[in-house]
Image (cartoon, rainbow, N blue to C red):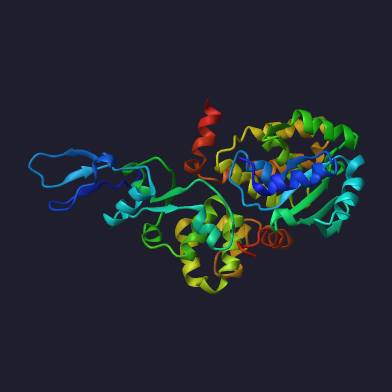
Amino acid sequence: MTEPTVEAAARVLRRHGIRFVVVGGQAIAQSAATATRDVDVMISTDEYGRAVAALSADPEATVAIEGGAVTRFGVKAMGGAPLDLIDAGVFCGTHSPSEFFTILATEYSFERDEIRYVNPAAVWYTRLLTKRWRAYAEKIVTNIIDGLDPKLLEDVERMAHRFGTESSLGPRLAYVRERLQDVPEALLGSSRRREAD
Amino acid sequence: MRLETRLFRDAGERPFPPRMDARVRRTRGRPRAEYRPAVRSPRDVELLRRHRVPAFLLTSDWVSRSGYPVSFRPWLILPERLVDGVESGFRVLPVRDEEAVRSPGIVELVSFLLRFDPLAARVVAVRNRSSMDPAELYRRVRNEGLEGPATRVRLQQFSPRIPRVGRPLPQDELRWIERNNPPLGS
């Protein structure tokens, strides 16, 4: 189900002809529980500057936080939920930013209600590449307890290999797996059952 | 070896309704019947509680009202040794101490959350600081063996006696989680 805040974000972005994919909690929310209210969208690096400028000039939007690869906007129609524009270049590894964005939007995403969301493995991939990766590791374990397949961690590994980010992601994936070892069997029921199938 | 608890209805006590399809067997000549109730709705959980069975349905609504807006499928919280005595359509969160299930308050909520969403536990503790009785929190964490997740989200800030097990998450990441998940209505 698409949240009204995501629909509102999509409307404002489309009004300016900005190509985007929904990432973060709203993308995870398509398959698991989530706490997030904000809407994170990823933009190709070559369009990022123009997207930030276009939203900054939009009377319906105000810049809340400006900061390099992420710019946070307040959008009236989103009722207080922030809209974060994220530069895809941060996650592209050895690929060019635009190539990475195209691959993400075509191979690691799905469309629902005419909005493109990245899949859970791609969300985990991006989250584990941020400086707050430990907090995100906790969220990944919570997603798995909530029923997401732990085998998706293998997809993250494959993404890291493909984009040449293994050296950063390898130890972080190991950390997530270590955390999973601490989770009682009873809580991983549905995930473990899926693993056994 | 493990302890198990079974449910029996005493003579004169009202039975569960047929929809909970509960009776297992009745031994001839014995006034008590063994029950294994099937729980499929919040109303069924309420009925269990009215029969003095320690069970509690944890919903995301309570967590959201306590300061961490979230949505998740409900958990049926049961004492570990009762898990096999109840058939549940809900996913089950077993706890060691059945007292935590009888009349859970905010400290118990934090201890439930530590099992499956430690970041939520942290934010709820921060937003309900005045209700975080340090002795009570210590007791719950120790009784449930949750020192590891409690340390990761630095619950020693609320109850310094909780033993440190493992490494805490960086303070700035925890602050960021708090900032990024404002309470409802903010």
- Corner quadrant of residue A163: top right
Horizontal arrangement in the rendering, residue B64 relative to residue A133 (left or right): left
Farthest left residue in view:
B29
Report if residue A136 is visible in the image: yes
Taking the spot 49% from the left edge, 38% from the top edge, the residue there is: A189
Taking the spot 74% from the left edge, 31% from the top edge, the residue there is: A108
Q: Position of residue A59 (x, y in %)?
A: 84, 57
Farthest bottom residue in view:
B130
Report if residue B164 is visible in the image: no
Q: Quadrant of the N terminus of chain A?
A: top right
Q: Position of residue B120 (x, y in %)?
A: 59, 57
Q: Position of residue A13 (x, y in %)?
A: 80, 44
Looking at the picture, does residue B146 appear above or below residue A117?
below
Q: Nearer the viewer, residue A68 or A142?
A: A68
Horizontal arrangement in the rendering, residue A62 relative to residue B64 (left or right): right
Q: Nearer the viewer, residue B38 or A76?
A: A76
Q: Position of residue A100 (x, y in %)?
A: 85, 34
- Corner quadrant of residue A173: top right
Q: Nearer the viewer, residue B88 or A141?
A: B88
